[in-house]
Structures are given as C-alpha cells and as structure tokens.
Image (spheres, helix red, strand yellow):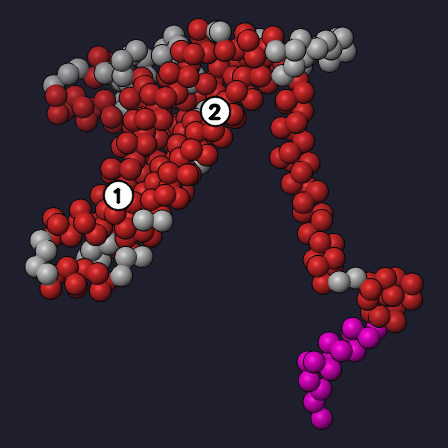
Amino acid sequence: MTTSPHTYADKAAEAAVRATPEPLVRRVRALSDKAIAWLFIAPTIALLLAINIFPLFWAIYLSFTNYRANRPNAEVKNVGLGNYSRVLNDPDIWASMQTTAHFVFWTILLQTVIGFALAYLIDRKFRGHAFWTTLILIPMMLSPAVVGNFWRFLYEPQIGLFAYAVSFLTGIPTSEIQMLGSVNLAPWAIIIVDTWMWTPYVMLICLAGLRSIPDYIYEAAEVDRASNWRQFWSITVPMALPFIMLAVLFRGIENFKMFDMVNLLTGGGPGSTTEVASITLKRDAFEAWATGRSSAFAIVLFVAVFGLANIYVKALNRVKQR
C-alpha cells in the first residue's frame, strides 16, 4: 500500500501546527493574506533600505557639513550651502562634466548605431546566426577589470596588437601610436573600449524590439509594393524606436557614472584629458579627503542624472503611445 505525497505534506503541516504555541497559531490565523505577504517581504525591504536609502540620506547630511573621513573625531560643523556653492563654481568640476558629456555622447552614438545594425543583421536569421550572436555577446560577459587590463595591453605602443594593426594599415611607426599617452587619442581609446564592451547589450535590446514586430505588417507592406528601404524607415525604425530609446537610457545612465574603465586605462590622464566626473569625485573623496564637498558633488550628479532621466522617460512614453 502506497502513501501519496499529499498525505506526507498534510502530516508534516499538522505536526508543525501542534509544535507551534497556541497563542502564536491564533495570531497567524488572524492575519490577512496581505499582512502575511508584508511579513515575508519586510526583511528584504529592510535590507534594501539599509543598503540603498540610508547611504543616500547620509550623503545628503554630509553634504551640508565640513566632515572629513580622515578626521572622524574632529568637530563636525554645518556649512549650509557652502559645499554646493563651491562645487557649482569650481571650473575643474565643470571641465570634468564636459569630459563626461563627451564620453556619453560618443559612446551612446556608436553603440546605438552599431548595436542596431548588428541586431538588424542577426534578425535576418541567416545560417549560423545563433553562433554569431553568442560570439558577439562575449565582451559583455567579461569583467570590466579584465577588459581594462586586456585593452591596456593591446594599446601598448611597442608590443600591443592595436599599434601593430594601425601601423600595418597606415605605415605610421608603432612608437608614435600612443593611444593612452596622447592628449588627442586617449579619450577615443576609452570610447573604443566601452563601445566594444557594451555594444552587444544595445544589440540585445534592439533585437528584442525587432523580434516584437509582427510579420503581417511586413506582408501588408509587400502587398502594397513597398520597397525594402521604405519598409525599413516606415515600419522597422518606428516600431523599434521605443527599444532603441530604452537602450540609450540604460547606457546613458551607466556611462554618466563611468569610472572603472577610465581608472584602469588612463586614471584620468594624460593630465586631466580623460578626467570624468566620477574620477574627480574619487579624488575629492579619497585623495583630498573633502568628504563634505564630495558628498555635495555626488548629490549634484544624482540630481542631474535623475532629472535628465525623468525628462527622457516622459519622451519615451510619448513615443510608446503613438
């Protein structure tokens, strides 16, 4: 004679009930489903608040003080809006913001164009497209530390493969190809690396948009004798546009916070050519130990990114409603 699994489950539940104190059983039975759900998710919410929300409010508090992390026992004074005034009137900070805007613009432009082009080609479902899709996704799966060290080796003027490839195509001596040491080439060296690494991410989002377009729309266009070029501009681009804009939003936010790649490749140099906002923030916080001022700078960056993202999301919603 066999016993069903449900019998064992029922017996286990009855044993658990008998082992639970009666007052606690009555309280649990009195709870509604909504209260029980909140009871289960409360620890997760508390953890998220501790990890995400508390540091934000702590940074806001520090931004109004003269606190220095290397002097924890010194008297903390309230300086009002003094830190914000110094941040907004500092020419070095505005220069780093301009450098950041330069990186954000060119990386997003290249990643969007190349990513959409790759997605459009893979969507044709040619023979072996699954293999090529997997191959293209490899850079995105790598750690930024690995990518930074890998490309730093490639950019070496004496032994790097990048210098040899450029020298072979242009005839310029490898010793003159200083990708990371040149004021003019260092920004583009970082843009190339970031584009190589994150174009597959944009491609995936664009590919999802292309795959979401119903086939019958193209069939109707073919019945109306619309050319491939007309179908591309009248059907493909408009219907994939929300996905393209979503990819731009995600990459824009991430590139605005770009730190690891710049720190690994150039450290903000040569000079301050590639010193983006995050590098300036790191130097203020952990080299100059101006914790209050760096907190104010971090809040300014947060407000700028949040405001721009909010405006962009409203534009994205209008495009989706068309």
Left or right relative to 58: residue 109: left
Residue 182 on image: x %, y %: 29, 12
- Residue 243 included in the magenta stretch of the image: no
Marks 1 and 2, how far apart in space? 28 Å
Find numbered disc 2 in the image and state the secondary structure of the residue it sits on.
helix
Residue position for label 2: 304
The picture quadrant where one finds residue 94 is top left
Left or right relative to 238: residue 99: right
Residue position for label 1: 116
Q: Residue at x 42, y 17 (%)?
A: 97
Is residue 280 in view from this perspective?
yes
Is residue 72 or residue 223 the one in the foreground? Answer: 223
Q: Residue at x 44, y 6 (%)?
A: 91
Disc 1 versus disc 2: nearer the observer: 2
Left or right relative to 14: residue 182: left
The picture quadrant where one finds residue 201 is top left
Residue 13 on image: x %, y %: 78, 73
Is residue 150 or residue 233 the one in the foreground? Answer: 233
Query: What's under tag 2, amino acid-wise?
Result: Ala
- Residue 7 included in the magenta stretch of the image: yes
Query: What's under tag 1, amino acid-wise?
Result: Phe
Instruction: Point out the stretch of residues depicted in magenta.
Output: 1-15
Give me the disc on residue 30: none
Look at the image and tell me in which quarter the N terminus lies.
bottom right
Circle 2 Cα neighbour tier, 10 Å, few/some/many (<14 / 14–19 / ≥20): few
